Image: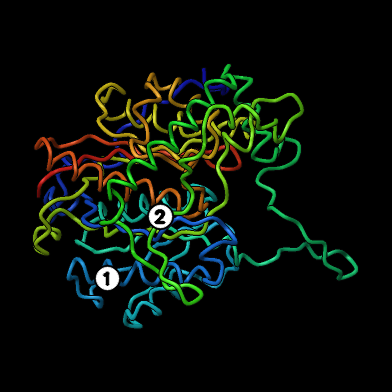
Amino acid sequence: MIPGPNPLPSVGPVWDDTAPVPGRDAASRQPVIIAALRTPICRANGQLKSLRAHDLLAPVLAALVESTGIDPAGVSDVVIGNAVGGGGNVARFAALQAGMPASVPGLTVDRQCGSGLDAISLAARLVAAGGDPVFLAGGVESISTAPARADRNDDGGLEFYTRARFVPPSLGDPDMGVAAENVAREFGVTRKRQDEYALRSHGRAVAAAGAGVFAGETVALEASGKTVDADDGPRASLKPALMARFPAAFVAGGTVTAGNSCFDADAASAVVVTSLKRARELGAADGLLVLGCDTAGVDPTLLGIGAALAARRLLAAHGVEAAQLDLVEFNEAFASQTIACMDELGLDPERANADGGALAFGHGYGASGAVLVTRLLAQARAAHSATGAESLALAMISIAGGMGTAALLRYSRL
């Protein structure tokens, strides 16, 4: 079970649309995502290595404005997650580069891997506060161009480091791969299950790409004189025999390998979040209603399990059983934590990431949480087109430092 000193608290919905609020009806308080786009997700130091974070994000913001027909001057704020950038408020920079007027502000948030999903959650909460605003929200990461970072010593000299500290050393601050091994050991996730899951992720991603599944959600980019319009991570050549040859990558004798771990990627993804009332005024035909969001903390040495606690708490708050979920997108930083989280929620891992996940596409840190939502909107629209169904969906992501964020969504015609 998920470790922790306290039992799960009894929590209510993030917002209650039945509660009377003077001057505001339920449609003005119900957040809805009406559009979602992303860049191709490409290996760090690869096809997108010449583009900085704002260069990745600006085309996505511009495409969202154009595709929805919203007035750029009417955008209330641009809320963007970013984990390893150089500061300077990339949300504001990218919004202006996208051609938005100077009157549109920008806010950059950092919850490491959860930044993109938390940015969307923040925008949804602001919508629920009232006023029928329109937000562009999401995340971006250019790992290829991330600045070198250093601590300043007492003598003024610089001591460079490769990653930030996430928690006090006394609480344990393992590298991500070591933490993934901790989860595999604590929750009994075998090497065989991890390898099988990773192979399935690649296989699904390759099949989906071949069927053109990602074309409608992807904004092509110009980089180094070439047009980049497709993800470059999924590998059709990855077979069981090759997976079995990968050695333990982080802990001697361990089960976590390069084959069942994600790789670093450059990407951006963003959505349009507004109220149901405003969405209807804009002529939006459908969208993902944001039913609620939650973020939880767990033991930092088992950080990969954070998403499961957040999701379990969120589902309980809304009276939803895991079996009722139609679509689930989880950030596959490591197969071990993906499987452990699904097991804890009572979800068959087969049901997660229908078109593959980060094990195949790569992990763009601050962008990854927003990619989950972009994928869910596309999947829900495809399901509705095929069957007329209105899907119940869950996005969740585990976060460095021992946290996890989850969002409960429902696709609906508006």
Look at the image and tell me whether residue 294 can be seen: no
Asked if the residue at tag 1 contacts the one at tag 2, i.e. Cβ–Cβ closer than 8 Å, the answer is: no
Q: Earlier in the sequence, mark 2 or mark 1?
A: 1
Marks counted in the figure total 2
Residue 44 vs residue 147, the one in the foreground:
44
Residue depicted at x 36% and y 53%: 120
Residue 31 vs residue 397, the one in the foreground:
397
Residue that label 2 marks: 119
Residue that label 1 marks: 75
Circle 1 SS class: loop
Residue 267 position in % (x across, y down): 46, 59
Residue 22 vs residue 126, the one in the foreground:
126
Residue 2 position in % (x across, y down): 52, 22
Mark 2 and mark 1: Cα distance apart in space: 15 Å
Residue 385 position in % (x across, y down): 12, 43
- How are the residues colored? rainbow
What amino acid is at disc 2? Ala
Circle 2 SS class: helix
In the depicted structure, whether residue 241 falls above or below residue 353: above
In the displayed structure image, the side of residue 183 where residue 68 appears, left or right: left
Residue 334 position in % (x across, y down): 55, 35
Residue 334: image tag: none
In the depicted structure, whether residue 252 falls above or below residue 88: above
Crowd tier of the residue under label 1, counting other residues whose Cα lies within 10 Å: few below 14, some 14–19, many 20 or above: many
In the displayed structure image, the side of residue 309 where residue 127 appears, left or right: left
Residue depicted at x 32% and y 28%: 315
In the displayed structure image, the side of residue 174 where residue 2 appears, left or right: left
